[in-house]
Amino acid sequence: MGKIFLFFIIAFFSCKAPNIESNFQTQNILAFYSKGSCSGTCPVYDVLIYENGTVVYNGIDHVQKRGMIRSAVSQSEIMDLKLLLDGSPVEFKSFRKAQGKPLTTIKYNKQTLTYHASKVDGSLKQLNTKLEDLVFQITSK
């Protein structure tokens, strides 16, 4: 009986969906950007941005391109992004999930910021727009 239970535990955890953060090396990651699901057809994707300009996109649901795309952006784009990330006076905190609204997550400098992109302004809106533009640049190639 114990062996059967152990088998089910192992099977359950081994069938977990892959996580983009665990699939790629975590050294030299500048930021992680993620768009969560909503009650409609909001795009769902994860993006890893590396210091060297490498960008790894994982289109999950309701996106033009599904699956993994590895791309690169210029060092000037990386510098602009760093300035926005470093200069953002936003306190890294989490918003509560509102029914039907997608959550956006940014992980940077060992901190996590979770928010509703439609309800932000100022420097956080600038940062979010920059990241969305970066994703569009990658997925429109």
Image (spheres, rainbow, N blue to C red):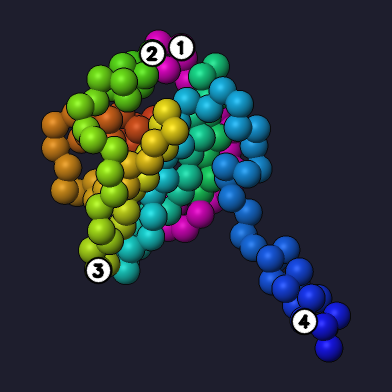
Disc nearer the start of the sequence (4/3): 4
Q: Distance between the residues labelled 2 and 4?
A: 51 Å
Read off the magenta span.
60-78
> Rounded to the nearest whole Å, what is the CA distance between mark 2 and mark 3?
36 Å
Q: Do residues under tags 2 and 1 come within 8 Å of each other at their CB atoms?
A: yes
Residue 39 visible from this viewpoint: yes
Per the image, label 4 sits on a secondary structure element best described as helix
Q: Position of residue 134 (x, y in %)?
A: 39, 30
Which residue is denoted by mark 4 in the rendering?
5
Graded by Cα atoms within 10 Å as few (under 14), some (14 to 19) or many (20 or more), the crowding at tag 3 reads few
- Image position of 119 (left or right of 97): left
* Residue 107 percent location from the top left of the image: 41, 37
Of labels 4 and 3, the one closer to you? 4
Mark number, residue 133: none
Q: Residue at x 14, y 31 (%)?
A: 122
Label 3 sits on residue = 99
Q: Do the residues labelled 2 and 4 touch (CB within 8 Å)?
A: no
Give yes or no for residue 63 being in the magenta stretch. Answer: yes
Q: Mark 1 points at which residue?
A: 75
Judging by the rendered image, the residue that carries numbered circle 2 is: 79
What's under tag 2, amino acid-wise?
Met
Instruction: Work out whether residue 3 or residue 113 is closer to the camera in this orientation and state it.
Output: 3
Q: Residue furthest left?
A: 122
Q: Helix, strand or loop at disc 3?
A: loop
**In terms of sequence position, does the residue under pointer 4 or pointer 1 come before the other?**
4
